[in-house]
Image (cartoon, helix red, strand yellow):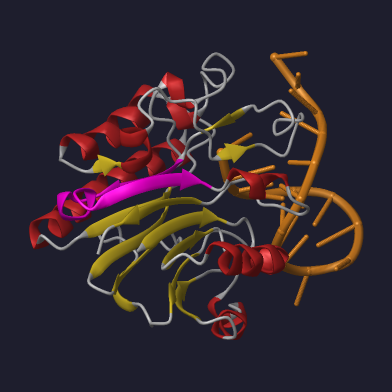
Amino acid sequence: MRIATFNINGIKARLPRLIEWLEETRPSVACLQEIKTQDEGFPADDFAKIGYEAIWHGQKGFNGVAILADGVKPVETQRGLSGDDSDEQARYLEADVNGVRVASIYLPNGNPQPGPKFDYKLAWMERLRVHAKTLWDAEIPTALIGDYNVIPEDKDVWSPAAMANDALMQPASRNAYFAMLSDGWTDAVNTLNPRGGVWTFWDYQAGAWQRDHGFRIDHLLLSPELADRMTAVGVDKEYRGREKSSDHTPVWAEFAD
DNA sequence: ATGGCGGATTAGATCCGA
């Protein structure tokens, strides 16, 4: 079973690339972020044609998350995070697929910092941590995956100095991320690439892709029940170099049955 | 130190992202 996450940066603009990736790599489950569409605009029929069923949680213009599964409909277990009734941003969707609980996460960017957007990011991370503890207690194989918008350590960015003031690598952002790891969640990519140097995002600007100026912000956090079954992880880096690509790459982990 | 690129939106300038 392969579980993947992909911030696609617009499902309408990216649909041909997304279909291509699904057919070429055939993940069992794909969590998408930044679908940037309202619910009624979600192209479910296009996925059904190639054998994927989906659930989605969108809004107009930006944000939005979805979960696709190969040959089976994801059974929704949670839509949005509790803890702030005024929060209307579509950033969290969770479902059961073939005995595994999967969450598609689009964590707030938080720039500029300091400021209200950074405060929202940190509050959202605390809400995620609280919810993750209830998932932990259920003892179901669980994968919390998506665009966390956190560069965990300096080894996860091409230039720590260039990004020093960015919300993605502030101490408060990192502390909130490592709080979840201290709760027991396993960072799948880091576990199998402990020396770092693995990127999942390259900016469209300033020739970042051509210069390999990237960083790692798309993460797969695994419960022990799932981490014990992990056999491989990967980044589908080649897709970043194709025409009309997202600025993120797909990231995945493979599990024994 | 700045801007750059790209998607989306009552369509042309602006917000948002990272």
Q: Is residue A19 above or below residue A222?
A: below
Q: Residue at the spot x=74%, y=50% of the render?
A: A242
Can I make out residue A86 in this image?
no
Q: Nearer the viewer, residue A166 or A9?
A: A9
Q: Quadrant of residue A100?
A: bottom left
Give the magenta part as a residue range. Answer: A218-235
Q: Residue at the spot x=40%, y=42% of the render?
A: A121
Q: Nearer the viewer, residue A8 or A97?
A: A97
Q: How many marks?
A: 0
Quarter of the image with the N terminus of chain A in it: bottom left
Q: Is residue A76 above or below residue A173?
A: below
Position of A131 with respect to A238 (left or right) is left
Q: Quadrant of residue A23?
A: bottom right
Does residue A25 belong to the magenta stretch? no
Q: Residue at the spot x=17%, y=59% of the render?
A: A135
Q: Quadrant of residue A163?
A: top right
Quarter of the image with the C terminus of chain A in it: bottom left
Does residue A229 belong to the magenta stretch? yes
- Residue A204, image x, y percentages: 72, 39
- Residue A116, image x, y percentages: 45, 39
Position of A235 with respect to A188 (left or right) is right
Can I make out residue A212 in this image?
yes
- Residue B14, image x, y percentages: 74, 48
- Residue A175, image x, y percentages: 29, 28
Q: Is residue B17 above or below residue A91?
A: above
Q: Main secondary structure of the magenta part?
A: strand
Position of A79 with respect to A201 (left or right) is left
Q: Is residue A135 above or below residue A164?
A: below
Q: Residue at the spot x=44%, y=57% of the render?
A: A4
